[in-house]
Amino acid sequence: MKLLSIAIPCYNSEAYMEKCIDSLLAGGDDVEILIVNDGSTDRTAEIADRYQVLNPNIVRVIHKENGGHGSAVNAGIENATGLFFKVVDSDDWVKESAYQQVLDTLRELAGGEQQLDMMVCNFVYNKVGEKRHKVMQYRSSLPVGQMFTWKEVKHFYKGHYILMHSVIFRTRLLHECGLKLPEHCFYVDNIYVFNPLPYVKNMYYLDVNFYYYYIGRTDQSVNQKVMISRIDQQLRVNKLMVDYYTDKSIRPRIDACSQLRNYMYNYLEIITTISCVLAICSYTPEDLAKKKDLWSYIKEKDYWLFMKLRTGIFGISMNLPGKGGRYFTVGAYKIARHFFNFN
């Protein structure tokens, strides 16, 4: 069995996928690299096959019909043979020195008495046009360099969460929690880092800048204009997260620890805020109606969740009356975007 399986979802990635794959090959035989060609129409399949021929003990290619990012991640999970699992997007890469530390730590923890469920590392926003890149680290929220549980997790401040770029999961845990991402939908990375959490018991934070997250392409899914054009997919993900959080079969796991419950609530709150901001920023009656529908959906699912979200600072600011209120919300969002350095 391999130590770590790494899935690379690829769709028309010929321009940048080689940098990603080359950075991961440094892991050697401890690593299984799963290049998932999600129905590409460019040279992605050809490039992937070449890497498999040159590195038969490390690289495995999965060719499939186009199903979107979530479908490609699903294929990676289904085919993974490694003890641990990570997703690396085809336009991103990892830092070699940190990579070796990650593998060394996973190897050490894999043989311990406690079973590691989730490793967290830092990631770096490699944003186009900026010389200094923002590092997302977790020193103020997580114990460093030791195994810990949810009870030892400290407060996460607003806008600071564990993202797909940060995490490595135990592969079997992803099967145990029944994780299945929706197909033909963007922004499913939020479900990927949300749904497994009630099943996570033991965690480890390795304070290294491991993952480099490229951000700034005009066609990128996190570009604001692109996100507004895909608001229906953002709302779909938002509602699926509400469904999961309010699921009666999952709630006992969530409620078992206040730190876990608070973290998941806060994450759901920020996703709901993003959905509302996108609807407001589009300045169309249709999208404002979708925002209203989202709040109605939450209210129908769980009245107390609705009240908590709606009367919080974000809920109030997302629902200020009239054009003036909406302009104020957009202005506040732009200030936050500049301060937190996101799209």
Image (cartoon, rainbow, N blue to C red):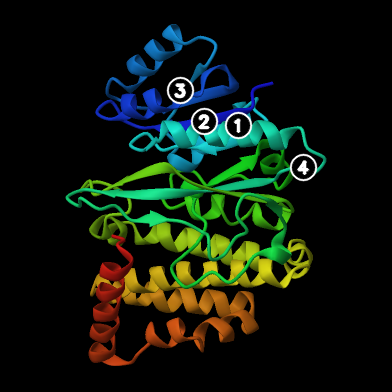
Evaluate if marks 3 and 2 touch, with contact meaning CB atoms under 8 Å apart.
Answer: yes
Q: Front-most of 239 and 16?
A: 16
- Pick the front one: 332 or 154: 154
Say what amino acid the circle numbered 1 marks.
Asp
Circle 4/circle 1 CB separation < 8 Å: no
- Label 1 sits on residue: 104
Single out the mark in the foreground, 4 or 1: 1
Real-space Cα separation, disc 3 to disc 2, in angstroms: 8 Å
Residue at label 3? 26
Q: Residue drawn 35% across and 90% down?
A: 320
Residue found at x 43% / y 31%: 96
Q: Is residue 152 above or below residue 314?
A: above
Give me the C-alpha separation between circle 1 and circle 2: 6 Å
Q: Are marks 1 and 2 in contact (CB under 8 Å)?
A: yes
Secondary structure under the numbered disc 2 in the rendered image: helix
- SS at mark 3? loop
Tell me what residue is drawn at x 72 percent, y 58 percent: 149
Q: CA distance from mark 2 to mark 4?
A: 21 Å
Q: Mark 4 or mark 2, which is nearer the start of the sequence?
A: 2
Residue 28 can be seen, yes or no: yes
